[in-house]
Image (cartoon, coloured by chain):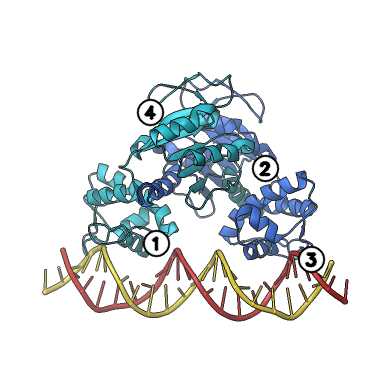
Chain colours: A cyan, B blue, C yellow, D red
Amino acid sequence: LTQTTDNRPVVQLPRPTLERLPTYHRCISAAVVNGEQFISSAELGRRLNIDEAQVRRDLSLVWGKGRPGLGYEAASLITRLDEVLGYNNVADAVLVGAGRLGRALYAYPGFKRYGLEIAAVFDVDSAVIGQMLQGGAHGEQVVLSAIKMPDLVRRMHIQLGIITVPADSAQLVANDMIKAGIRAIWNFAPIRLKVPNEVMVRHEDLAIGLATLSYHLTHTPTSLEL
Amino acid sequence: LTQTTDNRPVVQLPRPTLERLPTYHRCISAAVVNGEQFISSAELGRRLNIDEAQVRRDLSLVWGKGRPGLGYEAASLITRLDEVLGYNNVADAVLVGAGRLGRALYAYPGFKRYGLEIAAVFDVDSAVIGQMLQGGAHGEQVVLSAIKMPDLVRRMHIQLGIITVPADSAQLVANDMIKAGIRAIWNFAPIRLKVPNEVMVRHEDLAIGLATLSYHLTHTPTSLEL
DNA sequence: TAGATTGTTAATCGATTAACAATC
DNA sequence: TAGATTGTTAATCGATTAACAATC
Protein backbone atom coordinates (compact mmCIF):
# COMPACT_ATOMS: atom_id res chain seq x y z
CA LEU A 1 0.00 0.00 0.00
CA THR A 2 1.09 3.50 -0.76
CA GLN A 3 2.27 5.23 2.38
CA THR A 4 2.94 8.87 2.93
CA THR A 5 5.72 10.51 4.85
CA ASP A 6 3.67 10.36 8.03
CA ASN A 7 2.73 6.75 7.38
CA ARG A 8 -0.85 7.39 6.50
CA PRO A 9 -2.08 5.06 3.81
CA VAL A 10 -3.85 7.18 1.23
CA VAL A 11 -5.25 4.49 -0.98
CA GLN A 12 -8.94 3.96 -0.30
CA LEU A 13 -10.06 7.22 1.14
CA PRO A 14 -13.82 7.06 1.67
CA ARG A 15 -15.43 8.44 -1.46
CA PRO A 16 -17.34 11.21 0.32
CA THR A 17 -14.07 12.36 1.86
CA LEU A 18 -12.29 12.30 -1.49
CA GLU A 19 -15.06 14.36 -3.03
CA ARG A 20 -14.76 16.99 -0.32
CA LEU A 21 -11.02 17.42 -0.77
CA PRO A 22 -11.19 19.65 -3.87
CA THR A 23 -13.49 21.96 -1.96
CA TYR A 24 -11.07 22.16 0.94
CA HIS A 25 -8.29 22.72 -1.54
CA ARG A 26 -10.04 25.65 -3.14
CA CYS A 27 -11.01 27.23 0.15
CA ILE A 28 -7.54 26.93 1.63
CA SER A 29 -5.94 28.25 -1.56
CA ALA A 30 -8.11 31.32 -1.22
CA ALA A 31 -7.04 31.63 2.41
CA VAL A 32 -3.36 31.47 1.42
CA VAL A 33 -3.86 34.15 -1.22
CA ASN A 34 -5.60 36.13 1.47
CA GLY A 35 -2.48 35.97 3.64
CA GLU A 36 -3.90 33.62 6.29
CA GLN A 37 -1.18 31.37 7.69
CA PHE A 38 -3.28 28.99 9.76
CA ILE A 39 -6.85 27.90 9.35
CA SER A 40 -8.91 25.87 11.81
CA SER A 41 -11.40 23.13 11.12
CA ALA A 42 -14.11 25.34 12.59
CA GLU A 43 -13.28 28.15 10.19
CA LEU A 44 -13.13 25.83 7.19
CA GLY A 45 -16.43 24.32 8.21
CA ARG A 46 -18.01 27.75 8.50
CA ARG A 47 -16.81 28.81 5.06
CA LEU A 48 -17.84 25.60 3.36
CA ASN A 49 -20.93 24.70 5.29
CA ILE A 50 -19.46 21.44 6.52
CA ASP A 51 -19.53 20.14 10.08
CA GLU A 52 -16.25 20.94 11.79
CA ALA A 53 -15.84 17.40 13.11
CA GLN A 54 -16.20 16.23 9.52
CA VAL A 55 -13.44 18.57 8.42
CA ARG A 56 -11.12 17.31 11.14
CA ARG A 57 -11.82 13.70 10.34
CA ASP A 58 -11.27 14.23 6.60
CA LEU A 59 -8.04 16.13 7.10
CA SER A 60 -6.75 13.67 9.65
CA LEU A 61 -7.17 10.93 7.05
CA VAL A 62 -5.02 12.72 4.50
CA TRP A 63 -2.69 14.71 6.64
CA GLY A 64 -2.97 14.54 10.41
CA LYS A 65 -0.56 17.38 10.99
CA GLY A 66 -2.89 20.00 12.37
CA ARG A 67 -1.55 21.97 15.30
CA PRO A 68 -3.80 21.85 18.37
CA GLY A 69 -4.55 25.38 19.44
CA LEU A 70 -3.60 26.82 16.04
CA GLY A 71 -5.23 24.90 13.24
CA TYR A 72 -3.73 23.78 9.94
CA GLU A 73 -0.74 25.45 8.34
CA ALA A 74 -2.45 26.50 5.12
CA ALA A 75 0.44 26.42 2.67
CA SER A 76 1.67 22.98 3.71
CA LEU A 77 -1.83 21.60 3.69
CA ILE A 78 -2.23 22.74 0.09
CA THR A 79 1.03 21.00 -0.78
CA ARG A 80 -0.30 17.83 0.80
CA LEU A 81 -3.67 18.08 -0.97
CA ASP A 82 -1.92 18.68 -4.29
CA GLU A 83 -0.06 15.46 -3.66
CA VAL A 84 -3.09 13.40 -2.64
CA LEU A 85 -5.26 14.68 -5.46
CA GLY A 86 -2.51 14.19 -8.01
CA TYR A 87 -2.58 17.84 -9.07
CA ASN A 88 1.17 17.78 -9.62
CA ASN A 89 1.41 14.80 -11.92
CA VAL A 90 0.24 16.33 -15.18
CA ALA A 91 -2.35 14.04 -16.72
CA ASP A 92 -2.52 14.20 -20.48
CA ALA A 93 -5.99 13.62 -21.78
CA VAL A 94 -7.74 13.22 -25.09
CA LEU A 95 -11.15 14.68 -25.70
CA VAL A 96 -13.55 13.12 -28.17
CA GLY A 97 -16.46 15.21 -29.36
CA ALA A 98 -15.71 18.76 -30.46
CA GLY A 99 -19.25 20.06 -30.16
CA ARG A 100 -20.22 23.00 -28.02
CA LEU A 101 -19.62 21.22 -24.73
CA GLY A 102 -16.33 19.72 -25.87
CA ARG A 103 -15.07 23.09 -26.96
CA ALA A 104 -16.27 24.71 -23.74
CA LEU A 105 -14.34 22.16 -21.72
CA TYR A 106 -11.30 22.60 -23.90
CA ALA A 107 -11.31 26.30 -23.23
CA TYR A 108 -11.88 25.94 -19.49
CA PRO A 109 -8.96 27.77 -17.91
CA GLY A 110 -9.10 25.97 -14.55
CA PHE A 111 -7.87 22.58 -15.74
CA LYS A 112 -4.24 23.54 -16.13
CA ARG A 113 -4.09 24.36 -12.44
CA TYR A 114 -5.25 20.86 -11.63
CA GLY A 115 -2.70 19.17 -13.79
CA LEU A 116 -5.02 18.38 -16.66
CA GLU A 117 -3.62 18.90 -20.13
CA ILE A 118 -5.78 18.19 -23.16
CA ALA A 119 -3.33 16.74 -25.64
CA ALA A 120 -5.71 16.37 -28.55
CA VAL A 121 -9.34 16.83 -29.53
CA PHE A 122 -11.16 14.50 -31.92
CA ASP A 123 -14.44 14.34 -33.77
CA VAL A 124 -16.06 12.18 -36.42
CA ASP A 125 -17.80 15.05 -38.19
CA SER A 126 -15.83 16.06 -41.29
CA ALA A 127 -17.29 19.55 -41.01
CA VAL A 128 -15.58 19.91 -37.63
CA ILE A 129 -12.33 18.10 -38.33
CA GLY A 130 -9.61 20.59 -39.12
CA GLN A 131 -11.24 23.46 -37.26
CA MET A 132 -8.96 25.50 -35.06
CA LEU A 133 -9.83 25.34 -31.35
CA GLN A 134 -10.27 28.67 -29.60
CA GLY A 135 -9.16 29.75 -26.18
CA GLY A 136 -6.73 26.95 -25.64
CA ALA A 137 -5.06 26.95 -22.29
CA HIS A 138 -3.63 23.87 -23.97
CA GLY A 139 -2.15 25.68 -26.96
CA GLU A 140 -3.46 26.20 -30.46
CA GLN A 141 -4.85 22.97 -31.80
CA VAL A 142 -6.85 21.62 -34.64
CA VAL A 143 -9.66 19.07 -34.31
CA LEU A 144 -8.42 15.68 -35.51
CA SER A 145 -10.30 12.82 -37.04
CA ALA A 146 -11.54 10.39 -34.39
CA ILE A 147 -10.01 7.55 -36.38
CA LYS A 148 -6.61 8.71 -35.23
CA MET A 149 -7.46 8.69 -31.52
CA PRO A 150 -6.42 5.15 -30.53
CA ASP A 151 -3.06 5.46 -32.20
CA LEU A 152 -2.27 8.76 -30.48
CA VAL A 153 -3.40 7.42 -27.12
CA ARG A 154 -1.09 4.45 -27.49
CA ARG A 155 1.88 6.45 -28.72
CA MET A 156 1.59 9.08 -25.99
CA HIS A 157 0.57 6.62 -23.25
CA ILE A 158 -2.44 8.74 -22.47
CA GLN A 159 -4.47 7.50 -19.53
CA LEU A 160 -7.45 9.83 -19.36
CA GLY A 161 -10.24 10.16 -21.91
CA ILE A 162 -12.96 12.80 -21.98
CA ILE A 163 -16.15 11.95 -23.83
CA THR A 164 -18.41 14.72 -25.09
CA VAL A 165 -20.13 12.93 -27.96
CA PRO A 166 -23.87 12.18 -28.22
CA ALA A 167 -25.18 9.30 -26.10
CA ASP A 168 -25.47 6.84 -28.95
CA SER A 169 -21.79 6.85 -29.83
CA ALA A 170 -20.36 7.23 -26.33
CA GLN A 171 -19.99 3.50 -25.64
CA LEU A 172 -18.14 2.96 -28.91
CA VAL A 173 -15.76 5.79 -28.14
CA ALA A 174 -15.20 4.38 -24.65
CA ASN A 175 -14.44 0.93 -26.07
CA ASP A 176 -11.86 2.39 -28.44
CA MET A 177 -10.29 4.36 -25.64
CA ILE A 178 -10.02 1.36 -23.36
CA LYS A 179 -8.59 -0.84 -26.08
CA ALA A 180 -5.95 1.81 -26.63
CA GLY A 181 -4.97 1.83 -22.95
CA ILE A 182 -7.03 4.56 -21.31
CA ARG A 183 -7.53 3.95 -17.57
CA ALA A 184 -9.96 6.67 -16.60
CA ILE A 185 -12.89 8.18 -18.45
CA TRP A 186 -14.66 11.43 -17.83
CA ASN A 187 -18.01 10.94 -19.46
CA PHE A 188 -20.34 13.84 -20.26
CA ALA A 189 -22.65 11.84 -22.52
CA PRO A 190 -26.00 10.99 -20.93
CA ILE A 191 -25.49 7.26 -20.78
CA ARG A 192 -24.01 4.85 -18.26
CA LEU A 193 -20.89 3.33 -19.82
CA LYS A 194 -19.94 -0.31 -19.33
CA VAL A 195 -16.25 -0.66 -18.63
CA PRO A 196 -13.95 -3.30 -17.18
CA ASN A 197 -13.28 -3.16 -13.45
CA GLU A 198 -9.85 -1.63 -13.64
CA VAL A 199 -11.09 1.34 -15.67
CA MET A 200 -12.65 4.17 -13.74
CA VAL A 201 -15.53 6.19 -15.14
CA ARG A 202 -16.82 9.43 -13.80
CA HIS A 203 -20.28 10.19 -15.12
CA GLU A 204 -20.99 13.88 -15.26
CA ASP A 205 -24.73 13.60 -15.63
CA LEU A 206 -26.64 16.86 -15.96
CA ALA A 207 -29.97 15.04 -15.70
CA ILE A 208 -29.19 14.30 -12.05
CA GLY A 209 -28.61 17.92 -11.17
CA LEU A 210 -31.65 19.01 -13.07
CA ALA A 211 -33.81 16.34 -11.44
CA THR A 212 -32.83 17.31 -7.90
CA LEU A 213 -33.63 20.95 -8.60
CA SER A 214 -36.83 20.14 -10.39
CA TYR A 215 -37.89 17.88 -7.54
CA HIS A 216 -37.23 20.65 -5.07
CA LEU A 217 -39.24 23.14 -7.09
CA THR A 218 -42.23 20.87 -7.57
CA HIS A 219 -42.35 19.43 -4.06
CA THR A 220 -41.49 22.43 -1.91
CA PRO A 221 -44.23 25.00 -1.50
CA THR A 222 -43.59 28.61 -2.56
CA SER A 223 -44.17 31.27 0.04
CA LEU A 224 -47.17 32.18 -2.13
CA GLU A 225 -48.58 28.70 -1.83
CA LEU A 226 -48.30 28.56 1.95
CA LEU B 1 -47.39 16.17 3.20
CA THR B 2 -47.81 15.62 -0.49
CA GLN B 3 -49.38 12.26 -1.16
CA THR B 4 -49.64 10.35 -4.36
CA THR B 5 -52.52 8.37 -5.74
CA ASP B 6 -51.25 5.28 -3.95
CA ASN B 7 -50.73 7.24 -0.74
CA ARG B 8 -46.99 7.26 -0.86
CA PRO B 9 -45.54 10.46 0.51
CA VAL B 10 -42.97 11.66 -1.97
CA VAL B 11 -41.49 14.55 -0.08
CA GLN B 12 -38.17 13.61 1.46
CA LEU B 13 -36.97 10.79 -0.69
CA PRO B 14 -33.47 9.86 0.46
CA ARG B 15 -31.05 11.90 -1.63
CA PRO B 16 -29.18 8.88 -3.04
CA THR B 17 -32.52 7.47 -4.19
CA LEU B 18 -33.53 10.77 -5.78
CA GLU B 19 -30.23 10.91 -7.62
CA ARG B 20 -30.73 7.43 -9.04
CA LEU B 21 -34.18 8.19 -10.40
CA PRO B 22 -33.05 10.04 -13.54
CA THR B 23 -30.91 7.05 -14.39
CA TYR B 24 -33.84 4.67 -14.00
CA HIS B 25 -35.93 7.06 -16.04
CA ARG B 26 -33.48 7.06 -18.90
CA CYS B 27 -33.01 3.29 -18.88
CA ILE B 28 -36.73 2.57 -18.78
CA SER B 29 -37.40 5.12 -21.53
CA ALA B 30 -34.94 3.24 -23.69
CA ALA B 31 -36.72 -0.01 -22.83
CA VAL B 32 -40.07 1.46 -23.85
CA VAL B 33 -38.65 2.66 -27.16
CA ASN B 34 -37.26 -0.82 -27.55
CA GLY B 35 -40.75 -2.27 -27.24
CA GLU B 36 -40.31 -3.88 -23.82
CA GLN B 37 -43.53 -3.82 -21.86
CA PHE B 38 -42.29 -4.99 -18.49
CA ILE B 39 -38.90 -4.68 -16.88
CA SER B 40 -37.73 -6.34 -13.68
CA SER B 41 -35.57 -4.93 -10.92
CA ALA B 42 -32.96 -7.55 -11.76
CA GLU B 43 -32.83 -6.44 -15.39
CA LEU B 44 -32.66 -2.74 -14.47
CA GLY B 45 -29.92 -3.52 -12.02
CA ARG B 46 -27.96 -5.39 -14.66
CA ARG B 47 -28.24 -2.57 -17.19
CA LEU B 48 -27.32 0.15 -14.72
CA ASN B 49 -24.88 -1.66 -12.49
CA ILE B 50 -27.03 -1.22 -9.42
CA ASP B 51 -27.90 -3.89 -6.88
CA GLU B 52 -31.33 -5.31 -7.65
CA ALA B 53 -32.52 -4.97 -4.06
CA GLN B 54 -31.56 -1.32 -4.29
CA VAL B 55 -33.65 -0.90 -7.41
CA ARG B 56 -36.67 -2.51 -5.75
CA ARG B 57 -36.33 -0.39 -2.66
CA ASP B 58 -35.98 2.83 -4.68
CA LEU B 59 -38.94 2.05 -6.89
CA SER B 60 -41.09 0.96 -3.99
CA LEU B 61 -40.50 4.37 -2.43
CA VAL B 62 -41.79 6.23 -5.46
CA TRP B 63 -44.24 3.79 -6.94
CA GLY B 64 -44.77 0.44 -5.30
CA LYS B 65 -46.83 -0.91 -8.16
CA GLY B 66 -44.48 -3.56 -9.48
CA ARG B 67 -46.14 -6.84 -10.44
CA PRO B 68 -44.63 -9.87 -8.68
CA GLY B 69 -43.63 -12.40 -11.30
CA LEU B 70 -43.63 -9.80 -14.09
CA GLY B 71 -41.74 -6.70 -13.05
CA TYR B 72 -42.63 -3.07 -13.61
CA GLU B 73 -44.94 -1.90 -16.39
CA ALA B 74 -42.46 0.32 -18.18
CA ALA B 75 -44.75 2.95 -19.67
CA SER B 76 -46.64 3.62 -16.43
CA LEU B 77 -43.45 3.72 -14.44
CA ILE B 78 -42.13 6.43 -16.75
CA THR B 79 -45.33 8.39 -16.21
CA ARG B 80 -44.83 8.10 -12.48
CA LEU B 81 -41.17 9.10 -12.64
CA ASP B 82 -42.06 12.11 -14.82
CA GLU B 83 -44.46 13.12 -12.09
CA VAL B 84 -42.04 12.63 -9.20
CA LEU B 85 -39.15 14.34 -10.94
CA GLY B 86 -41.32 17.20 -12.07
CA TYR B 87 -40.53 16.66 -15.73
CA ASN B 88 -44.05 17.70 -16.69
CA ASN B 89 -44.20 21.02 -14.91
CA VAL B 90 -42.15 23.16 -17.27
CA ALA B 91 -39.64 25.13 -15.25
CA ASP B 92 -38.65 28.44 -16.79
CA ALA B 93 -35.08 29.35 -16.02
CA VAL B 94 -32.75 32.26 -16.52
CA LEU B 95 -29.11 31.74 -17.34
CA VAL B 96 -26.49 34.28 -16.36
CA GLY B 97 -23.11 34.09 -18.08
CA ALA B 98 -23.13 33.72 -21.86
CA GLY B 99 -19.60 32.41 -22.15
CA ARG B 100 -18.70 29.14 -23.77
CA LEU B 101 -20.22 27.00 -21.05
CA GLY B 102 -23.36 29.09 -20.82
CA ARG B 103 -23.89 28.86 -24.56
CA ALA B 104 -23.19 25.12 -24.53
CA LEU B 105 -25.85 24.62 -21.87
CA TYR B 106 -28.26 26.85 -23.75
CA ALA B 107 -27.87 24.71 -26.83
CA TYR B 108 -28.18 21.41 -24.97
CA PRO B 109 -31.09 19.64 -26.65
CA GLY B 110 -31.91 17.33 -23.72
CA PHE B 111 -33.32 19.97 -21.39
CA LYS B 112 -36.62 20.45 -23.17
CA ARG B 113 -37.45 16.80 -22.56
CA TYR B 114 -36.97 17.34 -18.85
CA GLY B 115 -39.21 20.34 -18.68
CA LEU B 116 -36.47 22.94 -18.57
CA GLU B 117 -37.00 26.03 -20.65
CA ILE B 118 -34.37 28.75 -20.70
CA ALA B 119 -36.41 31.91 -20.85
CA ALA B 120 -33.54 34.36 -21.11
CA VAL B 121 -29.76 34.55 -21.12
CA PHE B 122 -27.81 37.40 -19.55
CA ASP B 123 -24.27 38.69 -19.39
CA VAL B 124 -22.43 41.75 -18.12
CA ASP B 125 -19.99 41.92 -21.02
CA SER B 126 -21.09 44.55 -23.51
CA ALA B 127 -19.26 42.65 -26.25
CA VAL B 128 -21.57 39.69 -25.64
CA ILE B 129 -24.83 41.52 -24.95
CA GLY B 130 -26.94 41.61 -28.09
CA GLN B 131 -25.36 38.51 -29.61
CA MET B 132 -27.74 36.00 -31.10
CA LEU B 133 -27.72 32.62 -29.36
CA GLN B 134 -27.19 29.62 -31.60
CA GLY B 135 -28.84 26.24 -31.51
CA GLY B 136 -31.72 27.26 -29.35
CA ALA B 137 -34.05 24.48 -28.39
CA HIS B 138 -35.50 27.45 -26.56
CA GLY B 139 -36.03 29.59 -29.65
CA GLU B 140 -33.94 32.35 -31.16
CA GLN B 141 -32.76 34.69 -28.47
CA VAL B 142 -30.40 37.52 -27.89
CA VAL B 143 -28.12 37.89 -24.88
CA LEU B 144 -29.53 40.53 -22.54
CA SER B 145 -27.78 42.84 -20.15
CA ALA B 146 -27.48 41.28 -16.71
CA ILE B 147 -28.93 44.44 -15.22
CA LYS B 148 -32.31 43.39 -16.56
CA MET B 149 -32.27 39.96 -14.95
CA PRO B 150 -33.99 40.66 -11.60
CA ASP B 151 -36.84 42.51 -13.24
CA LEU B 152 -37.50 39.71 -15.72
CA VAL B 153 -37.32 37.07 -12.99
CA ARG B 154 -39.88 38.96 -10.96
CA ARG B 155 -42.22 39.65 -13.85
CA MET B 156 -42.16 36.07 -15.13
CA HIS B 157 -42.10 34.47 -11.65
CA ILE B 158 -39.05 32.49 -12.64
CA GLN B 159 -37.89 30.06 -9.97
CA LEU B 160 -34.71 28.54 -11.37
CA GLY B 161 -31.42 30.32 -12.04
CA ILE B 162 -28.42 28.92 -13.86
CA ILE B 163 -25.05 30.49 -13.10
CA THR B 164 -22.21 30.18 -15.60
CA VAL B 165 -20.19 33.24 -14.71
CA PRO B 166 -16.62 33.26 -13.33
CA ALA B 167 -16.20 32.36 -9.67
CA ASP B 168 -15.65 35.91 -8.47
CA SER B 169 -19.02 37.19 -9.59
CA ALA B 170 -21.11 34.08 -8.91
CA GLN B 171 -22.12 35.06 -5.37
CA LEU B 172 -23.28 38.48 -6.52
CA VAL B 173 -25.37 36.95 -9.27
CA ALA B 174 -26.84 34.47 -6.81
CA ASN B 175 -27.76 37.28 -4.40
CA ASP B 176 -29.54 39.17 -7.16
CA MET B 177 -31.38 36.04 -8.22
CA ILE B 178 -32.54 35.27 -4.70
CA LYS B 179 -33.67 38.82 -4.05
CA ALA B 180 -35.74 38.59 -7.22
CA GLY B 181 -37.47 35.43 -6.05
CA ILE B 182 -35.45 32.53 -7.45
CA ARG B 183 -35.85 29.35 -5.37
CA ALA B 184 -33.32 27.00 -6.93
CA ILE B 185 -29.87 27.65 -8.36
CA TRP B 186 -27.85 25.49 -10.69
CA ASN B 187 -24.32 26.69 -10.14
CA PHE B 188 -21.51 25.91 -12.56
CA ALA B 189 -19.06 28.43 -11.13
CA PRO B 190 -16.29 26.90 -9.04
CA ILE B 191 -17.31 28.37 -5.74
CA ARG B 192 -19.62 27.31 -2.92
CA LEU B 193 -22.52 29.77 -2.81
CA LYS B 194 -24.05 30.94 0.45
CA VAL B 195 -27.81 30.99 0.23
CA PRO B 196 -30.72 31.08 2.66
CA ASN B 197 -32.16 27.76 3.83
CA GLU B 198 -35.23 27.78 1.64
CA VAL B 199 -33.18 28.22 -1.55
CA MET B 200 -31.69 25.09 -3.02
CA VAL B 201 -28.33 25.12 -4.76
CA ARG B 202 -26.91 22.40 -6.91
CA HIS B 203 -23.17 22.79 -7.34
CA GLU B 204 -21.94 21.29 -10.56
CA ASP B 205 -18.29 21.22 -9.66
CA LEU B 206 -15.91 19.92 -12.31
CA ALA B 207 -13.01 19.96 -9.86
CA ILE B 208 -14.64 17.09 -7.97
CA GLY B 209 -14.88 14.87 -11.03
CA LEU B 210 -11.37 15.71 -12.07
CA ALA B 211 -10.03 15.05 -8.60
CA THR B 212 -11.59 11.61 -8.33
CA LEU B 213 -10.16 10.62 -11.70
CA SER B 214 -6.79 12.12 -10.97
CA TYR B 215 -6.70 10.34 -7.62
CA HIS B 216 -7.47 7.06 -9.33
CA LEU B 217 -4.74 7.59 -11.90
CA THR B 218 -2.08 8.52 -9.40
CA HIS B 219 -2.93 5.93 -6.75
CA THR B 220 -3.78 2.88 -8.82
CA PRO B 221 -0.87 1.07 -10.41
CA THR B 222 -0.74 0.63 -14.18
CA SER B 223 -0.37 -2.89 -15.49
CA LEU B 224 3.11 -1.75 -16.51
CA GLU B 225 3.95 -0.79 -12.95
CA LEU B 226 2.85 -4.08 -11.45
C1' DT C 1 0.14 28.65 32.48
C1' DA C 2 -4.55 29.30 30.15
C1' DG C 3 -7.04 29.03 25.97
C1' DA C 4 -7.73 26.96 21.72
C1' DT C 5 -8.00 23.34 18.69
C1' DT C 6 -6.47 18.97 17.25
C1' DG C 7 -6.98 13.61 16.36
C1' DT C 8 -9.52 9.85 17.77
C1' DT C 9 -12.93 7.02 20.16
C1' DA C 10 -17.63 5.99 20.75
C1' DA C 11 -22.45 6.93 19.63
C1' DT C 12 -25.60 7.97 16.21
C1' DC C 13 -27.56 8.06 12.03
C1' DG C 14 -28.80 6.58 7.49
C1' DA C 15 -28.13 3.79 3.39
C1' DT C 16 -27.33 -0.70 1.29
C1' DT C 17 -27.92 -5.53 1.01
C1' DA C 18 -29.96 -10.16 2.15
C1' DA C 19 -33.72 -12.87 2.82
C1' DC C 20 -38.33 -14.29 2.29
C1' DA C 21 -43.45 -14.33 2.67
C1' DA C 22 -46.84 -12.45 -0.41
C1' DT C 23 -48.63 -12.52 -4.95
C1' DC C 24 -48.91 -12.07 -9.98
C1' DT D 1 -50.57 -24.82 -10.39
C1' DA D 2 -45.39 -23.66 -10.79
C1' DG D 3 -42.12 -20.13 -11.56
C1' DA D 4 -40.83 -15.52 -11.14
C1' DT D 5 -40.46 -11.34 -8.98
C1' DT D 6 -42.25 -8.04 -5.94
C1' DG D 7 -42.34 -5.08 -1.36
C1' DT D 8 -40.70 -5.14 3.12
C1' DT D 9 -38.33 -6.57 7.31
C1' DA D 10 -34.07 -7.37 9.49
C1' DA D 11 -29.04 -7.43 9.24
C1' DT D 12 -25.12 -5.21 7.72
C1' DC D 13 -22.31 -1.78 6.46
C1' DG D 14 -20.35 2.77 6.33
C1' DA D 15 -20.49 7.68 7.12
C1' DT D 16 -21.44 11.57 10.20
C1' DT D 17 -21.48 13.72 14.57
C1' DA D 18 -20.41 14.35 19.60
C1' DA D 19 -17.29 14.33 23.10
C1' DC D 20 -12.92 14.72 25.16
C1' DA D 21 -8.06 13.67 26.44
C1' DA D 22 -3.86 15.15 24.32
C1' DT D 23 -1.14 19.00 23.03
C1' DC D 24 0.29 23.30 20.79
Q: In this view, does B139 lie to the left or right of A195?
A: right
Judged by depth in the image, the label closer to the viewer, 3 or 1, is 3
Label 2: chain? B
- Asked if the residue under mark 3 is in contact with the one under mark 4, i.e. CB atoms within 8 Å, the reply is no
> Which residue matches tag 2?
B114
Q: Which amino acid does label 4 sit on?
A: Ala
Residue B174: give x, y in percent of width and height.
48, 41
Amino acid residing under circle 2:
Tyr
Which of the two discs, 2 and 1, sits closer to the camera?
2
Label 3: which secondary element? loop
Q: Are marks 2 and 4 in contact (CB under 8 Å)?
A: no
Numbered disc in front, either 1 or 4? 4
Local packing at callout 4 (Cα closer than 10 Å; few below 14, some 14-19, many 20+) is some
Under circle 1, the secondary element is loop
Query: What residue does disc 1 label?
Result: A51
Query: Where, by quadrant of the figure, is residue A13 drawn?
Result: bottom left
Residue B88 appears anywhere in the view? no
Question: What distance separates the C-alpha of mark 3 from that of mark 2?
Answer: 31 Å
Residue at the spot of label 3: B69
**Can you give x and y, in whole percent of width and height, for residue A65 in the image?**
23, 60
Separation of marks 2 and 4 at Cα, in angstroms: 34 Å
Which label was assigned to residue A137? Answer: 4
x%, y% of residue A70? 21, 60
The Cα–Cα distance between marks 3 and 1, rounded to whole angstroms, is 46 Å
Asked whether, in this view, residue B62 is left or right of residue A159, the answer is: right
Instruction: Select label 3 or label 2 by which is in front.
Output: 3
Q: Which amino acid does label 1 sit on?
A: Asp
Q: Which chain carries label 4?
A: A
Report the chain holding disc 1: A
Q: Which amino acid does label 3 sit on?
A: Gly
Instruction: Say if mark 3 contacts mark 1, CB within 8 Å.
Output: no
